[in-house]
Image (spheres, rainbow, N blue to C red):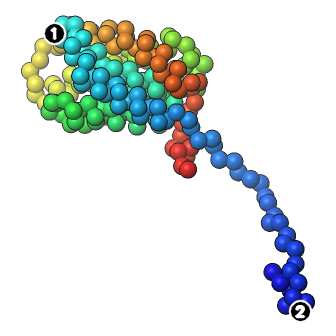
Amino acid sequence: MADPVTGEFEPVRPLRVGRIRSLPARPAHLGRVAIMAAVVVLLQITLMPYLSVSDGIPDLCVALVVLVAVFRGPFVGAVLGFSCGLLVELTTPVGTLGVLALLFLAAGYWCGRFVDRPEAESLGLPVVLVIAACAFVQVGYAAFQLLLGTEIVASAVAVQIIAPTIILTALLSFPLLLVVRRLLGAPMDVEPGMLRS
């Protein structure tokens, strides 16, 4: 600013800087999560019905939701779970819109709580979580069908649908785990504040 008497400019003093708060690093690879989700949903509705054993079909979507949740935390797991469940329900002829989305959301959030454990980088914990989440989704969906009044025999559903689905999903989770680990890297808990630009 110029001095009104002399007309000369005063040197600008630097602003006083207090303690600088560092923002959390912006998470990398979230675009890869979206691409993986689109590919897996496409495979789920086109290819997986042809890989059935008895009446069980492998559930790649729940496997992806669990694995991404283990590598990126409960927030990303819940959002991905809801998105994948809703996409599957919108692209296949089901009469219960939103049920799979809520079941996948719950599975993604719960499995994402294991992101900080050292076992998250091993093969054992993610595969066990995939099996548990697949069982949760299958039993939850069957229970919801019972609540709607659908007449089903519980033992037949358990033997012909739920057990083969869990086994096939567990078998396909190993190669999917390797792909997710390769694309996402080390486990990191992503929180909503990190997503702001």
**At label 2, which amino acid type do we have?**
Val
Q: Is residue 46 left or right of residue 180?
A: left
Q: Nearer the viewer, residue 29 or 85?
A: 29
Neighbour tally class for label 2: few under 14, some 14-19, many 20 plus, Cα within 10 Å: few
Residue in view at x 47 percent, y 36 percent: 31
Identify the disc placed on residue 156. Answer: 1
Mark 1 vs 2, N-terminal side: 2
In which quadrant is the N terminus drawn? bottom right
Q: Which residue is mark 2?
A: 5
Residue 179 x %, y %: 47, 19
Snapshot quadrant of residue 142: top left
> In terms of secondary structure, where does tag 2 sit?
loop
Q: Nearer the viewer, residue 112 or 28?
A: 28
Check whether the beta carbons of the residues at disc 1 and disc 2 lie within 8 A of each other. Answer: no
Snapshot quadrant of residue 79: top left
Residue in view at x 63 percent, y 43 percent: 24
Q: Would residue 113 be visible to someone looking at this image? A: no
**At label 1, which amino acid type do we have?**
Ala
Residue in view at x 57 percent, y 30 percent: 188
Numbered disc in front, either 1 or 2: 2
Above or below, 132 against 21 in this view is: above
Neighbour tally class for label 1: few under 14, some 14-19, many 20 plus, Cα within 10 Å: few
Residue 60 x %, y %: 33, 20
Residue 69 x %, y %: 46, 28
